Image (cartoon, grey):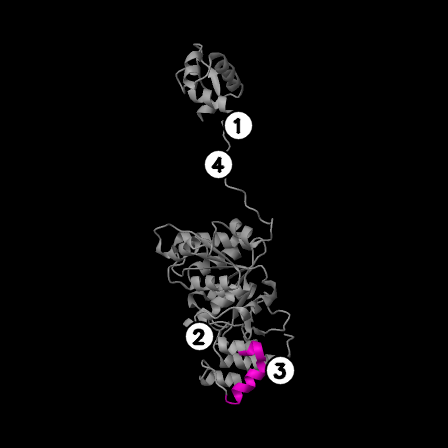
Amino acid sequence: MTGPDDDRLHRVALSALGEPGDPRLLDSVTRLGAAVVHELLLSGHTIEELQTDPDARRSAADPEQTLARAADRGLRFVVPGDPEWPVQLDDLATAAPLQRRGGVPIGLWVRGPARLDQLVGSVAVVGSRSATTYGADVAADLASAIAATGRPIVSGAAFGIDQAGHRGALAGGGSTVAVLACGADRFYPTAHRELIEYIAAHGAVVSEALPGWSPTQLRFLARNRVIAALTVGTVVVEAAARSGALNTANWATRLNRHVLGVPGPVTSAPSEGVHHLIRSQAAVLVTSGADVLEVVGAAGEHLVAEPRGPVRSRDQLTTRQRQVLDAVPVVQAAPEASIARTAGLGLAEARTVLAALAERHLAERAPGGGWRLAALARE
């Protein structure tokens, strides 16, 4: 960590004093600097959401000890000015608050070998905690395809779509990052302890919250803006009308990031929020990792071919040939004159066209002298 030591200590103290995503505190730090804001608070100035918990106050009073305890747990504190600082987070300085959360984080507590400055080009995969089998399978497949191209997958380690996104990225041989609403040294949900430990060993676990802190609703809302800001695009897979994933998508829109939505069955309540995003043109409809890569990639990169049905033997026929072929019986052979009348052509022209169709193995002369479809045309 190569940021100025004094600035880092001030930021540790402020991290202990303030709630993650408190826009008043974070905007003040962005405008005035951590040292000035810290001194103002020490001199009696107040901010609405300052911590009154004694443990938090002790952490603020002894930031060096807080850093040391965090290091013992394998955590580092990454702040603006560090080479590892993800500069895309600075875009939060110009985005208006949402649900009373906003601003550039004072710093991020990180556990794991993955560097945050390597998350440029990463993609968020978020969605319902109560995911259906369909949603989980789609999320895992998307994440696997994206991660296989070297783009890290970022999510929140929650049940449902988050879990599927992380596991899909790992299955695709890629990297994944979990952004938590609690301290980066904790495991939430506790049922995902093994997954979070694995991510911490091979990717990174990130949190704006002080080590040891519990998850709260406000911290989830603050966490969502970090996920959106770290990534170039957010893919929403299954989100009901009221869903935290929609909050992440909203932040992505505010930050001029891509928002992508995976449609579900039209009768599916878990997909209602996604369908609204797509219908209101707030999200691009995607159905595969290839679709996502085409949207988030550079111009001309990862282009997806237009979907087409199989090429059939009839596709290259002229209009006259189609007329005659449509008049040829499937099984019971018909004479040339009958075929000509049905096709609306003269006998001579119909005879010429039938010969051409025979060369293409689409029509054949029956033993009795009439014409019928060949096996290739019947297919």
Residue under the point 64% across and 79% down: 4
CA gap, disc 1 to disc 3?
75 Å
Residue depth check, mark 4 versus mark 1: number of the one nearer the observer: 1
CA gap, disc 4 to disc 1?
14 Å
Q: Secondary structure at mark 2?
A: loop
Magenta segment includes 33: yes
Residue depth check, mark 3 versus mark 2: number of the one nearer the observer: 3
Which numbered disc, 1 or 3, marks the residue that appears first in the sequence? 3
Count of numbered marks: 4
CA gap, disc 4 to disc 2?
53 Å
Q: Along the horizontal axis of the image, is 206 left or right of 338? A: right
The span shown in magenta is 28-44
Q: Amino acid at mark 2?
A: Ser
**Mark on residue 316?**
1
Which numbered disc, 4 or 1, marks the residue that appears first in the sequence? 4
Residue depth check, mark 4 versus mark 2: number of the one nearer the observer: 4
